[in-house]
Amino acid sequence: MNVPNHVAIIMDGNGRWAEKRGLARSRGHLEGSKTLEKLAIHAMDMKVKVLSVYAFSTDNFKRSQEEVDYLMNLFIKMFQTKFDKINKRGIRVVISGRKRGLREDVVASINAIEEKTKENKEGILNICLNYGGQEEIIDGAIKLAKDIQNGLDITNFKREDFYHYMYHELPPIDLLIRTGGELRISNFMLYEMSYSEFYFTNTYFPDFDKSEFNKALFMFENRDRRFGGISDAKNN
Ligand code: FPP
């Protein structure tokens, strides 16, 4: 099976999942966090090496204070107590995004989970938190500018080299999944997504279980990825 090396998920539809059941939006986020825990392990079982997820965008701060607080407390709780299975499965957890602007206790829990799992080698779970794709490119460009000031020779600087300036040096995304029915990328991992295949589904994220994930893998297996060239079949 041709498995994508790096899968990214825009975990949308938590709120609508809850509203449809007459529950508070926060309940949707809680169910979404349980889905994520299971999916991360399943993805690695399917031989995916990196799973990136959009947990909180720089723009999500526009939501009500109550919802923002709920999500921040949920991240802390998950990182402190609920990620044991992920750690035991040998998955390294990294967080992408701007730490400035986040509460101190959130930053502390991010540092703790990254430290706790840093030697894990079975795969990477990249959680994008206070994250924006344009912001990641800007922050990377600023780091590169500093290196240039310090004498870096950029005569032969290639697009592959810029990955070094991203929050974590992760490989390009092969497959992007968006749940919840919207057809947009919402400022998510723009640099890494250049040649990604897209899979959109109406399923709300809390319902996006292993079999839904496998459907996306199956679709990926049947896509003809040409990276700007022509397909092998036509080449022959
Ligand atoms: C988008 O759905 C979802 C979010 C903004 C939050 C996603 C967070 C989780 C799934 C929890 C993850 C937990 C950890 C530990 C990383 P929405 O609220 O915009 O849904 P809607 O479009 O139906 O309103």
Image (cartoon, grey):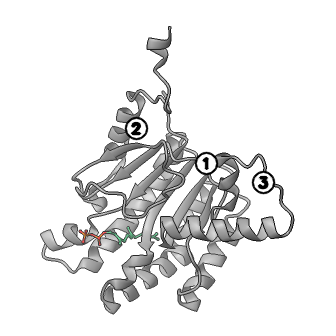
Reading the chain from its start, which is encountered first: label 2 or label 3? 3
Reading the chain from its start, which is encountered first: label 3 or label 1? 3
Local crowd size for mark 3, using a 10 Å CA cut-off: few (<14), some (14–19), many (≥20) = few
Q: Position of residue 53 (x, y in %)?
A: 46, 60
Looking at the rendered structure, the kind of residue marked 3 is: Ile
Single out the mark in the foreground, 1 or 2: 1
Q: Nearer the viewer, residue 82 or 231?
A: 231
Q: CA distance from mark 3 to mark 1?
A: 21 Å
Numbered disc 2: secondary structure: helix
Classify residue 221 as left or right of residue 25.
Answer: right
Image mark for residue 50: none
Numbered disc 3: secondary structure: loop
Q: Nearer the viewer, residue 56 or 48?
A: 56
Numbered disc 1: secondary structure: loop
Reading the chain from its start, which is encountered first: label 1 or label 2? 1
Q: Nearer the viewer, residue 152 or 184?
A: 152
Q: Which residue is mark 3?
A: 154
Q: Which residue is mark 1?
A: 171
Labels 2 and 3 touching (C-beta < 8 A): no
Q: Position of residue 69 (x, y in %)?
A: 39, 88
Q: CA distance from mark 1 to mark 2?
A: 18 Å
Q: Position of residue 179 (x, y in %)?
A: 30, 55
Q: Residue at x 57, y 64 (%)?
A: 137
Q: Is mark 3 within 8 Å of ligand 1?
A: no
Looking at the rendered structure, the kind of residue marked 1 is: Pro
Q: Which residue is mark 2?
A: 217
Looking at the rendered structure, the kind of residue marked 2 is: Leu
